[in-house]
Amino acid sequence: MNNIQRHLALLLPELEAGGAQRVMLSMAGGLARRGHRVDLLVLAATGPLRDELPAAVRLVDLAVRGGDEGGTIFALRAVARLAGWLRHERPAALLSTISGTNLAAVLARALGSPSTRLVLREAVTLDNVVSPGRLRLMRWLYPRADCVVALSHHMAAQINRSLGVPLPRIRRIANPVDTARIHDLAARPLSHPWLMQPDARLIVGVGRLIPQKDFATLLRAFARLPAAGVRLAIVGDGPERSDLARLAVELGLSDAVLFVGFDANPWRWMARAELLVSSSRWEGHPNVLLEALALGLPVVSTRYDPSACELGELAGGIPVRLAEVGDVDGLSRQIADALAAPAARHHGAPSSVEAGITAYEDALRG
């Protein structure tokens, strides 16, 4: 590996509290620590993770305005703004993530700086996620990138089979976990009346309150648990919060469910729980599950795609139980089984963040 310092750009739609955004912030900081000049480009500089921008990374707000986000007018303006920036700055390489942003990156690179190496990071699997129109665009544009990053073996096979990207241009890079950092953050103080009770049993769910995460299924599964005295904390915010709060009331869970809202340090809640549950309909390779395993926290998850089975390879002996997507009874049974067989807490897999930085550095170099 050579140590030549280069101008690298990373592209995100915004800075909401999503897994893709956290990974890109971590990689931006890591690449900057290795001496590269790093710019983090966003279509709109909104979202709580703006406060977590690494000090050595320059934030570039492309300030795309007008039209519905994801609509044609917005997309054309995003391409124009990004192409103009690329034409002026001429970075050595551009790393983009999330499919809509990736499509804009391919077009903008062609218009603004064809010599810039382009790496696309696909954040989710393709099944039941993208519209037929978006899938056609991906088939046309993704093969024009120099490299496409897949988060799992299953995703790599999909990108090759469904999008026509040649296998030599696909790299599998699992989401890196900074174990030392999250252990430090998990040890920070946390005060809540539930945590003061010596016999308290806590389940935690972490993620944005959006349809993809399907917290409604988690609430319904939790309502069917036979165990008494168990409580559920949902850490995250999003457009479904009011609907989920109403559902909790309808299910008679008002005293047993806490909607924490956005917390920049969700690992404090994970460290004080005996189980993390993910009810997602689809994922790429979810950070929250990898982080839970790094903290030694047992996991119950939906089988969001075939790569969910890869979690067991990363668990290091920590229990991982799987239920089918949308299966309320199945998810409830897996939660009940996990609570009935509490596991001794121990450290999970070692930190993979430096290996992740190296993998992305290599992908950006070519």
Image (spheres, rainbow, N blue to C red):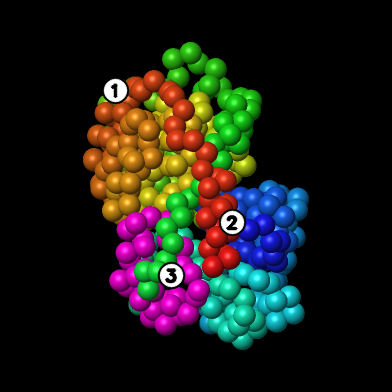
Q: Which residue is mark 2?
A: 1
Tell me which numbered mark, 1 or 3, is placed earlier along the sequence: 3
Q: Is residue 49 above or below residue 162?
A: above
Q: Does dot 3 land on a helix, a strand or a loop?
A: helix
Start-end of magenta stretch: 136-165
Q: Which quarter of the figure has residue 182?
A: top right
CA–CA distance in space, label 3 to label 2: 19 Å
Q: Which residue is mark 1?
A: 340
Q: Does dot 2 land on a helix, a strand or a loop?
A: loop
Q: Amino acid at mark 2?
A: Met
Q: Is residue 215 left or right of residue 331?
A: right
Badge 1 density bin: few <14, some 14–19, many ≥20, Cα 10 Å:
few
Q: Which residue is mark 3?
A: 169
- Please name the residue shown 37% across and 36% down the image: 315
Residue 256, given in percent of the width and then of the height, sits at 43, 30
- Please name the residue shown 54% across and 36% down the image: 179
- Please name the residue shown 61% across and 86% down the image: 111
Q: Amino acid at mark 1?
A: Ala
Q: Quadrant of the N terminus?
A: bottom right
Q: Are marks 1 and 3 in contact (CB under 8 Å)?
A: no
Q: Which quarter of the figure has residue 265?
A: top right
CA–CA distance in space, label 2 to label 1: 49 Å
Residue 144, given in percent of the width and then of the height, sits at 47, 80
Q: Is residue 1 above or below residue 296?
A: below
Residue 77, given in percent of the width and then of the height, sits at 63, 81
